[in-house]
Every structure is written in structure tokens, then in C-alpha cells.
Image (cartoon, grey):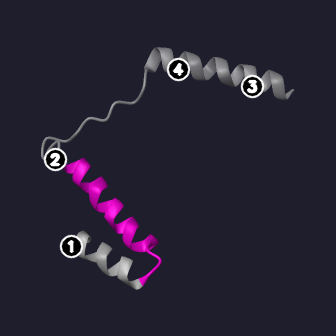
């Protein structure tokens, strides 16, 4: 039963990939091309603050975040 389902699932997925292709992200006109990169960079800095283990690391990460 499991093998049968995996075969059906793989057939559907491969057909959908061929017909539809991968989802393309279209950016809005009012958002510049650099904006998503800047958002990711800021998110990474925020993650660094949250993952810092010592107070000095946290202070340094907060200084970079601002």
C-alpha cells in the first residue's frame, strides 16, 4: 500500500513540476530589487542577537543590528 502511494505521489509531483514549473517570485513595482536582500540581512542580524550566548556577544550583535 505504501509503495503504491509513493509511486502515485511521485508521478503527480513530477508531472506538476514539468507542466507548472517552479513558482516564480514576481516583485512588486513599489519594492526595489535590493529590498528582499536587505530584509534577509536584517533578519540574520536579529537571529544573531537571539542566538548570542554571552552579554558581550549580544551587545556587539545589537550594535550591528542598529
Magenta stretch: includes residue 26: no
Task: Verify CB contact (< 8 Å) between mark 2 and mark 3.
Answer: no
Question: Disc 1 versus disc 3: distance between alpha carbons?
Answer: 49 Å
Which residue does the numbered mark 2 point to in the structure image? 31
Tell me the mark number nearer the camera, choosing from 1 and 4. Answer: 1
Task: Depth check: give the residue in front, 57 or 46.
Answer: 57
Which residue is at 30% across, 76% downward?
A: 60
Which residue does the numbered mark 1 point to in the structure image? 66
Q: Residues within 10 Å of mark 2 (few under 14, many from 20)?
A: few
Question: Disc 4 versus disc 2: distance between alpha carbons?
Answer: 30 Å
Q: Residues within 10 Å of mark 3 (few under 14, many from 20)?
A: few
Task: Depth check: give the residue in front, 36 or 65.
Answer: 65
Give the magenta part as a residue range.
35-54
The numbered mark, 4 or 3, whose residue comes first in the sequence reads 3
Quarter of the image with the C terminus in it = bottom left
Magenta stretch: includes residue 40: yes
The numbered mark, 1 or 4, whose residue comes first in the sequence reads 4
Which residue is at 16% across, 47% downward?
A: 31
Which residue does the numbered mark 4 point to in the structure image? 16
Task: Verify CB contact (< 8 Å) between mark 1 and mark 4.
Answer: no
Question: How far across and down, in percent of the image, does residue 35 sit?
Answer: 19, 50
Which residue is at 22% across, 39% downward?
A: 27
Question: Disc 1 versus disc 4: distance between alpha carbons?
Answer: 44 Å
* 25 to 10, vertically: above or below: below
The numbered mark, 1 or 3, whose residue comes first in the sequence reads 3
Question: Disc 2 versus disc 3: distance between alpha carbons?
Answer: 41 Å
Amino acid at each position: 500500500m505504501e509503495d503504491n502511494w509513493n509511486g502515485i505521489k511521485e508521478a503527480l509531483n513530477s508531472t506538476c513540476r514539468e507542466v507548472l514549473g517552479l513558482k516564480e517570485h514576481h516583485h512588486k513595482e513599489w519594492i526595489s530589487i535590493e529590498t528582499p536582500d536587505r530584509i534577509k540581512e536584517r533578519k540574520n542580524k536579529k537571529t544573531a542577537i537571539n542566538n548570542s550566548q554571552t552579554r558581550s556577544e549580544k551587545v556587539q550583535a545589537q550594535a550591528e543590528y542598529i
